[in-house]
């Protein structure tokens, strides 16, 4: 039976244990070896479980993992909601022949 410890990256308990058996003893090294915590949730769902498992098997979980930015870049205008305002010079219409008044 396959037991997932990270749903985003499909990392199994077996893979986590294999990393520890290969000598990866700290949480960051286990993350880099298995890929847990690198999916869409950036460890929000799996970090506590994986850290507990690493700790129970004698690993070091004192230092946090290194978070990474989202995989798909997002423009600041989208984050700020400027696209909704349909302003000239911003968002996806930038550089297109676009009349903001209709």
Image (spheres, rainbow, N blue to C red):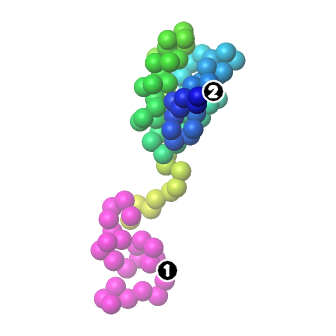
Asked whether 101 or 38 is in front, the reply is 38
Residue at 42%, 71% (x, y): give it.
91
Give x and y (percent) for residue 29.
Answer: 60, 24
Span colored in magenta: 78-102
Residue 51 picture location, percent across and down: 48, 21
Q: Which of marks 1 and 2 is in front?
A: 2
Residue at horizontal 58%, vertical 30%? Answer: 2
Decide if residue 102 is on the left or right side of residue 21.
left
How many neighbours does mark 1 have within 10 angstroms: few (below 14), some (14-19), or many (20 or more)? Answer: few
Whether residue 52 is visible: yes
Q: Residue at the front extreme?
A: 1
User: Which residue matches tag 1?
Assistant: 95
Asked whether residue 32 is in view, the answer is: no
Residue 56 lies, with reference to residue 95, above or below; the image says: above
Residue 59 appears left or right of 97: right
Q: Which residue is drawn at 33% across and 90% down?
A: 102
Mark 2 — residue? Answer: 15
Give the mark nearer the N terminus: 1 vs 2: 2
Residue shown at 49% from the left, 49% from the top: 70
């Amino acid at each position: 039976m396959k037991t997932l410890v990270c749903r985003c990256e499909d990392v199994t308990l077996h893979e986590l244990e294999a990393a520890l058996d290969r000598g990866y003893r700290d949480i960051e090294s286990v993350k880099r070896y298995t890929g847990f915590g690198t999916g869409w949730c950036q460890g929000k769902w799996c970090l506590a479980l994986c850290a507990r498992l690493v700790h129970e098997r004698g690993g070091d979980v004192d230092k946090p993992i290194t978070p990474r930015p989202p995989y798909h870049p997002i423009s600041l205008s989208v984050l700020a909601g400027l696209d909704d305002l349909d302003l000239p010079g911003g968002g996806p219409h930038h550089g297109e022949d676009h009349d903001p008044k209709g």
